[in-house]
Amino acid sequence: MNTTLVDSPFRTDVLQGLSASPKYLLSKYFYDARGDELFGQIMRCPEYYLTRAEAEILSLQSGAILERCGGMQGSFDIVELGAGDGSKTVFLLREALRMQGSGRYYPIDISPGIINYLSQTLSTKLPGLEVHGLAGEYFAMLEQMQALTESPKLVLFLGATVGNMLPEEAAEFFQQLKTYLRPGDYLLVGFDLKKNPQTILDAYNDKEGLTKAFNLNLLQRINRELGADFKPGQFEHFPVYDPLSGSCKSYLISRCSQRVIFDDDTVIEFERDEPIYMEVSQKYSKTEIQALALKAGYEPVDAFFDCRHQFTDVLWRV
Ligand SMILES: C[S@@+](CC[C@H](N)C(=O)[O-])C[C@H]1O[C@@H](n2cnc3c(N)ncnc32)[C@H](O)[C@@H]1O
C-alpha cells in the first residue's frame, strides 16, 4: 500500500463522498489525463453547443471586451481559472497582445497535464506572450500568483465552469475571489443561459456517449489511483434538468446491489438503483446573473452574447 496515496485529499474526498447519504463525488476530480482528453472530445461534439457559442463570442468580440476594460491603462495580467486547453482563450490573448504588444498569462488548472500543454504550446502560438502556468486548486494558486505579480488583472472564468457550483456556492466563490483582486480589476465569466430544456439535456447526454464515458472515467480513476474495484458497466449515466431551478444534475445509478472494495480494505455498499451525484451544470437567466454580480459585490460592466443568445460572457469590475 502506498502511504502517500492513503493520505491524499483525493482518497479522503472520495471516501467521504461515497460514505455520505446520498452518495456524491466531486466534479473537480473528473480531470485526470483521460478526463482532459474526454472533455476535449465533448467540447467538439454536436450536442455540446456551449463551446461553439463561447468560441463565437471570443472570436468576434474579444476586441470589444478588452476595450470595455478601458480603465486598465498600460499592461495588465490575464489570469484564467480552470483554463482547460485554452482553445477559446487564444482569441482574447491574441487581441490583448495586439493591443499591448506583449502580455502575461497565468492559467490556473487542477490538471497538471493541461498546464504543461498550455506552457508548451502557447508561447509558440502567440509569440510575445509570457505564460506562467499554475497547476492546482483555484485559491491556492491565486495565493501563489500574488507573490509573482502586482499588476492590474483581468480574470477569466470561462466555459460555464461556474455552473459546476450551485448559485449560493457561486456567490461565496466570487466573494472569496475578490479578496485576491484589487479595486479596478476585471472578471470575465462565461455563463450558460436557460433555454429549451431538451437542448440542455442533450448536451449532457450526447449520442456518442462521451459524457457518459467522462462520468464513468472518474470510477476508473478511483480504480487506478485508489486501488478500488468499481465495475463501470454496472453504473448507468443519468442526467436530469429542472427548468425552474436551472440545475442540470448528472448521476451514476447503480444497476444492481453491489460492493466496491478499496486497496485499504474499505468497503462501499450500493443498493440497486442507488445514485451517486456527480455534477451540477447550473443555467442562469440574465436577471439571475445580474443579481449574482451584485450579491458577490461586483459592478456589472457589460454582457456579450453569441448570435443565438445561448451563452454569455459577462464582464464585472471589482
Ligand atoms: C468545464 S472545464 C472548462 C475548461 C475551459 N475553461 C473551457 O472553457 O474550455 C473546467 C476546467 O476547470 C478545471 N478545474 C475544475 N475544478 C478546479 C479547481 N477546483 N481548481 C482548479 N481547476 C479546476 C478542470 O481541470 C477543467 O480544465
Image (cartoon, rainbow, N blue to C red):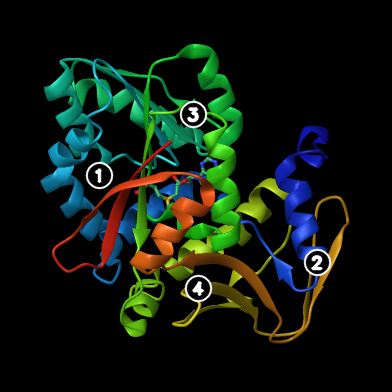
Q: Is residue 274 above or below residue 105?
A: below
Q: Position of residue 158 (x, y in %)?
A: 36, 47
The residues tagged by marks 4 and 3 sit, at their Cα atoms, a distance apart of 29 Å
Name the amino acid type tagged 2. Answer: Ala
Q: Nearer the viewer, mark 4 or mark 3?
A: 3
Labelled disc at residue 247: 4
Query: Alpha carbon of mark 1 to alpha carbon of mark 3: how far?
Result: 23 Å
The residue tagged 2 is: 20
- Relative to 275, say whether 5 is above or below: above
Q: Nearer the viewer, mark 2 or mark 4?
A: 4
Image vertical order of residue 42 relative to residue 1, above or below: below
How far apart are the two marked residues, 4 and 1, measured between alpha carbons?
25 Å
Instruction: Give the residue pinned by disc 1.
Output: 88
Q: In which quadrant of the rendered image does the N terminus lie?
A: top right
User: Is any part of residue 158 visible from this angle?
Assistant: no
The response on whether ligand 1 sits within 8 Å of label 1 is: yes
Cβ atoms under marks 4 and 1 closer than 8 Å: no
| Quarter of the figure that contains the C terminus | top left
Across and down, in percent, residue 41 comes to 32, 57
Q: Secondary structure at mark 3?
A: loop
Residue 290 placement: quadrant: bottom left
Q: Which class describes the residues within 10 Å of circle 4: few (<14), some (14-19), or many (20+)?
A: many
Q: Earlier in the sequence, mark 2 or mark 4?
A: 2
Which of the two discs, 1 and 2, labels the residue nearer the N terminus?
2
Residue where numbered disc 3 is placed: 181
For marks 4 and 1, the one nearer the N-term is 1
Cβ atoms under marks 2 and 3 closer than 8 Å: no
**Residue shown at the point (44%, 28%) measured from the top left:** 183
